[in-house]
Image (spheres, rainbow, N blue to C red):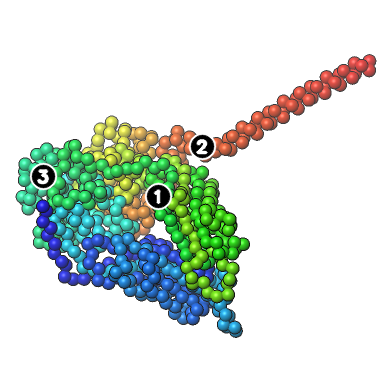
Amino acid sequence: MVQSKTVEAADNQTYTQQFQNTTTTLSGKSVVSNMYFTKVDYWNVKKVNFNLNYQISQLASRQSSDITVSINGVKFYSFRPKAETGFQTEKISIPLDLLQASNKLQINGQVLDQDNQNKNYQLSQTPANWLTIGNGSNVNFEYQVNEADNTVSSFYDHFSGKDTISFQQARIVTSNHPTSDELTASMIALSGESRTISTDSDQIPVVKMSQLQDKTGDYSIIMANYNKLPNKFKSQINVADVNGHAVIKTYYVDGKHYLLVTAKDGKLLEKAARFVANEELMRETTKSNKSISASTDTYTASQQDSGTHSLTKTPDRIDGAGHRETSYFIQIPNDKTNVDGSKINLHFKYSKNLDFSRSLVTLYVNNTVVGSKKLTSVRADGDDLTMAVPKGVALGSSFTVRVAFDLEMKNQSESDNSDTPWAEVEPQSKMVVKSGQSNDLLFTNYPTLFINNESYDHLVVITPENLNDDDFKTLTNIFNLIGLYSKNNTGSIQFYNQIPSQSVLNNNNVIVVGTPKNNAMIKKLNPNLYFKYSSNFDRIVSNEKLSIEAGYGKNIGTAQLLRSPYNDKRGMLVVTGVTTKDTYLASTQIGFQKNIQGYTGDAIVTDLNNSHSGYRFKKDKAIDKSLAKKQTFTKNSQLILYLSLAIIVIIMIGIAVILTIRKQSRLNRGNKDGQK
């Protein structure tokens, strides 16, 4: 029996959860928008406020227009917009008894114009009926923390909590002079945590053991060889327990929470790190310690992507007249990209009290219209719509399918606040996504070029032998983003602190981090770099894309995506600068999705003034040229077929013309002979 040590925190804390929605305009006299947020399970919530940032049409009547808010299907707050123009904020208290772990907020707006002469509602829908919800909308929690008990699952829950990460209280700690195996284990653990982070501005740092004395870091994972553990940690583990095994164990002291992950053998330490990187296993471990052997199953469960994605598992009902929308989030493997041929198959039904001359359903992918269909009374009990996504539409690895119903009523003489009519999207609805392997050696395809089946694709990382704080921050940035894309912990990754063998370089994707002084691999690669170093390696020199003044070249960092000089079907990322700080600054541009999305080339340059620019050097962007030719052929297969048919027709016409001419020539000769 495990005894839980629980201490109730005395002070209230606050946490603001921003909605991921961008600024959105909803048009129509009746508008609906959905927002989603979560409540962390170890919070003892005292108060929750929903801050709605919105703007309403200047022509809308403030006396007749209204906005209603519901949570998890229960309406609890209504208000009329203030007589103001521009954005305004409504602070709304959410009833605590309606809160769940996952919550759906729905905004229902009745946006009505009013004729000042006869005071009647103007219910015809016009472009002036709109409500805009700003991206500043959020939910603010006031809560107390129920402290972690001494189980692995409870530690993991707190360590990966939204507030713990946002307040920079979570970190991964390894040796001051880590071995390659310790670095490999630390980055595997970081990758596992990165994929659970829901924001695009937070990360978990990997730091040296010497930084344990910092005030920050209430929750720390200690990832180190048993013989290199500080005595206060080593004393918590029986030496017999690490003979042929790795150990994962919680240890709490002086308000600090530690998860000790250690082994005498590097491969066992890596095995334990894969266990830590498996969210399901960590949440299922309800003991204070776990022993890991070479045979322990640590791999994350993976599902083969068939291309077919269900829109909803249960019937999704939409109530109310006018324009109503519901949306579905679709995600494909990060190392895939969509190709032409994707289709949406929608099954739905709707009420029969509609004005069917004006009612319809429209499909969107993100903001692209896919197609529409009129609703009919005959098909009300079971309708369907299949539409192909327009050719050339780039979907990305995640996108939204929107289903918009225009449920128009025959009687428009009064406002339509009732919950009739209705429409319902059925569970049979699905989207079939045609996808292919990403094949671009550009930052538009980073880091997916290092990912295969959502895991590391034979990845080798070459670092300096002695790492300082800047080096650790650089590695944190790199693996924060790579971890987000590697959904599984099954791939191959290995760190080296010296130049590896030719065989290793020939058969792997490679990441190289460091300066010419602390990493010999940088010097070796200098002839292959787009931004090269001078002969004495004290500055980066000019090239055909950028003129670099001598002093300026001593204080810039670069991130460069090269075709591997050891295998032309593999990629190589080089993050380097004259100093470790320059190297770190370059890594800041490849640490978050919001940063990397700004680059379309294969090289990035940063300086001490936070100036950063992107460049394109290689003409042939394909990683695998044979795959690129195959994809080009597949993409143009119909065109090739039509051209082939056209050529056949032209040849047949040509043959027919030649035969006709020859026949006519023989007839002419026969006529001449007859006349003679």
Q: Residue placed at 32% from the left, 58% from the top?
A: 199
User: Mark 2 to mark 3: distance in Å?
Assistant: 54 Å
Q: Helix or strand or loop: what does disc 3 sit on? A: helix
Number of other residues with Cα within 10 Å of mark 1, as a class: few under 14, some 14 to 19, many 20 or more: few
Q: Residue at x 51, y 59 (%)?
A: 350
Which amino acid is tagged 2?
Thr
Q: Can you tell which mark lies on residue 331?
A: 1
Residue marked by disc 2: 634
Which of the two labelled residues, at mark 1 and mark 3, occupies the earlier sequence position?
3
Secondary element at tag 1: strand
Distance from the alpha carbon under mark 1 to that under mark 3: 40 Å
Image x and y of residue 29, in percent: 52, 70
Residue displayed at 42% across by 47% down: 309
Q: Closer to the camera, 171 or 415?
A: 415
Mark 1 or 2: in front is: 1
Horizontal side of residue 154 vs 364, given as left or right: left
Q: Residues within 10 Å of mark 2 (few under 14, many from 20)?
A: few
Sequence order check, earlier mark of 2 and 3: 3
Q: Is residue 477 left or right of residue 371?
A: left
Q: Is there a contact, CB below 8 Å, between mark 1 and mark 2? A: no
Q: Is residue 424 left or right of residue 1?
A: right
Residue under label 3? 226
Viewed as shown, does residue 489 lie left or right of 676?
Answer: left
- Kindly check if marks 2 and 3 are in contact, taking CB atoms under 8 A apart as contact: no
Q: Position of residue 269 (x, y in %)?
A: 17, 42
In the displayed structure, 75 sits above or below 632; it is below
